Amino acid sequence: MNLTAINGEVPIAAYLILGAILFSIGIGAFLIKRNIISIFMSIELMLNAVNLTFVAFAHHWHAVSGQIFVFFVMVVAAAEAAVGLAIIIAIFRTRKTLNVDQINLMQN
Amino acid sequence: MQLALFIIFAALAIAGALNLLLQKHPINSALSLVVVMLSLAVLYWSLGAEFLAAAQVIVYSGAIMVLFVFVIMLLNAGEEEHTTGSRAAYFAGIPGALAVFCLLSFVFLREGKALGSVGLSTAPVGAMSNIAEISQVLFTKLLLPFEVTSILILVAILGAVVLARKEEQQ
């Protein structure tokens, strides 16, 4: 195990594994949740996990480009959230449900 | 100090994420996602990214989550019911997520020695302030992508308005 901390410092690998844990929980929530809003929130959780990995690597290489990438990811996530929630509202208007199992217009 | 900070906020983030997974009501999931984002902001700060910590609080837990909570309240979303389709997702979802986690943590642990560690004392060399450094790159080298994002956000606002507008009855 390389995760032993020396004199109060945290290994970068611990940050990366935290990112992996959050990403995996996001995948699980994405597949298990049936409410379309909860599914959308688990996508945001996965984006956050990837952002943490970016920042950890940016710290490791003393490079500022990783942090700028996270900034752009945040901007795109904000735009995505606005459009996605508008789509959810439009779906709810026509189908009167938020359950993804009942939104199956393309199936038949 | 750094270790205690990491342990507290990593535990908080994992607990919030698990709560997001386990809660049935979307508003509870949204509030636990706020906990995850705020503790990630503290972790960004401990990694020397003060600007991103502030942006995380303002953009994610401020703007995006408020949007989520508004939509949950607007649509009056209740508890989700389980259907036959979600049973297959249980059997595929949990092992799949575990497999991804095992793969990622295997790689990170194997390369862990090469990656080094973070302490509050080990500030990055070239002690220019982080925000000054970011803005230097953002407004010189990456000025065009930065301006393009403003167009992206404008298009997103227009798209959201068009999609969410009530259709006129004819």
Image (cartoon, coloured by chain):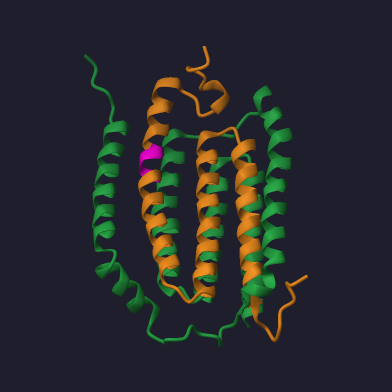
Q: Is residue B31 left or right of residue B136?
A: right
Q: Residue at position x 52%, y 11% from top?
A: A108
Q: Nearer the viewer, residue B97 or A91?
A: B97
Q: Is residue A78 magenta?
A: no
Q: Residue at position x 55%, y 34% from top?
A: A35
Q: Position of residue B160 (x, y in %)?
A: 31, 38
Q: Which residues are magenta?
A: A81-85
Q: Position of residue B119 (x, y in %)?
A: 59, 82
Q: Residue furthest left?
A: B170
Above or below for B152 versus A31: below
Q: Position of residue B29 (x, y in %)?
A: 57, 47
Q: Can residue B124 be seen here?
A: yes
Q: Residue at position x 51%, y 22% from top?
A: A103
Q: Is residue A40 left or right of residue B165?
A: right
Q: Colour in which chain A is shown?
A: orange
Q: Is residue B108 left or right of residue B75?
A: right
Q: Residue furthest right?
A: A1
Q: Main secondary structure of the magenta part?
A: helix
Above or below for A4 versus A36: below
Q: Can residue B12 be seen here?
A: no
Q: Quadrant of the N terminus of chain A?
A: bottom right
Determine the image quadrant of residue A31. Answer: top right
Number of marks in the rendered image: 0
Q: Residue furthest top?
A: A108
Q: Position of residue A44 (x, y in %)?
A: 50, 49
Q: Nearer the viewer, residue A36 or B128?
A: B128
Q: Nearer the viewer, residue A49 or B31?
A: A49
Q: Residue at position x 38%, y 54% from top?
A: B63
Identify by letter the chain in green: B
Determine the image quadrant of residue A94. Answer: top left
Determine the image quadrant of residue A101. Answer: top right
